[in-house]
Amino acid sequence: KAGVTQTPRYLIKTRGQQVTLSCSPISGHRSVSWYQQTPGQGLQFLFEYFSETQRNKGNFPGRFSGRQFSNSRSEMNVSTLELGDSALYLCASSHQGASNEKLFFGSGTQLSVL
Amino acid sequence: DQQVKQNSPSLSVQEGRISILNCDYTNSMFDYFLWYKKYPAEGPTFLISISSIKDKNEDGRFTVFLNKSAKHLSLHIVPSQPGDSAVYFCAASGFGNEKLTFGTGTRLTIIP
């Protein structure tokens, strides 16, 4: 069974631009979550999608948005990029997104904002 | 506010010895706890979990201990091996709070 796939692996953007990241969950998984990892901050929860609906949202500004398609694939968009958005963005999937389910992570997209 | 805290950013342990990684939490609603391991350039992978009805869970060389009164959990790795060198994250969740809350991670280095 293929794992969680994230594309692209690396991105370099400049301030003010916008970016779209993609995530394909494990086949059969309907919940997709996004996390931001920065040094010293650990993994910060961005949002979770289930059946094309945003079910949970973390404390990030509205510049961060996402969506999920009918095949459970998900995209995350960041508009008006800031230097502080430089981070590793991780996508994780699970069957139902229940609190006691383990998450399966992709390898992440490393975003650098110059 | 950091609800899950890993106060040691790094830890070095001799190969063959015990590695003990610690994690504290503040939210008393958390009732499920997990440890993830992360190698560079890879996503975190699930290691072991424990629910609040238990105080210990073992899986091979890995044991997680939970002290609910102290809001503290620890991961013991015995014996430590070079392949255990990685960043370890603890995470917690609770009923009605479906998202996992992660700590900031501890970088474990096993010295041969």
Image (cartoon, rainbow, N blue to C red):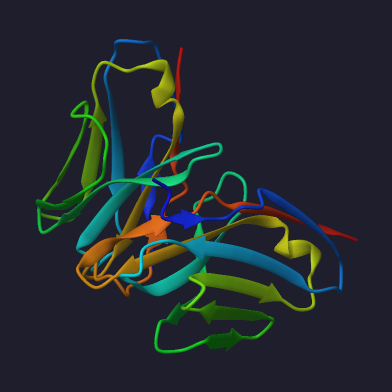
Q: Quadrant of residue A58?
A: top left
In the rendered image, the residue lying farthest to the right is B112
* Outermost residue to the front: B69
Which residue is depicted at the point 55% across and 87% down?
A: B56
Using the image, determine if residue A34 lies above or below residue B66.
Answer: above
Going by the image, does B41 lie left or right of A87? right
Looking at the image, is B19 positioned above or below residue B1? below
Residue A26 in sight here: no
Quarter holding the N terminus of chain B? top left
**Camera-side residue: A51 or B95?**
B95
Kindly identify the residue that appears in the image at 46 percent across and 32 percent down. A87
Left or right side of A54 for B40: right
Task: Classify residue B97 as left or right of residue A45.
Answer: left
When asked about the image quadrant of residue A93, the answer is bottom left
For the C terminus of chain B, the quadrant is: bottom right
Q: Position of residue A11 (x, y in %)?
A: 43, 25
Q: Decide if residue A97 is in sight here.
A: yes
Residue A84: image x %, image y %? 42, 22
User: Where in the figure is residue B35, as x and y percent of width and height?
Assistant: 52, 67
What is the total number of numbered labels drawn onto the structure image? 0
Residue B68 in the figure: left or right of residue A76: right
Coordinates of residue B111 in the picture (x, y in percent): 87, 58
Viewer-closest of B65 and A78: B65
Query: Residue placed at 23% from the left, 21% from the top?
Result: A79
Residue drawn at 85 percent across, 73 percent down: B17
B28 and A77: which is toward the camera: B28
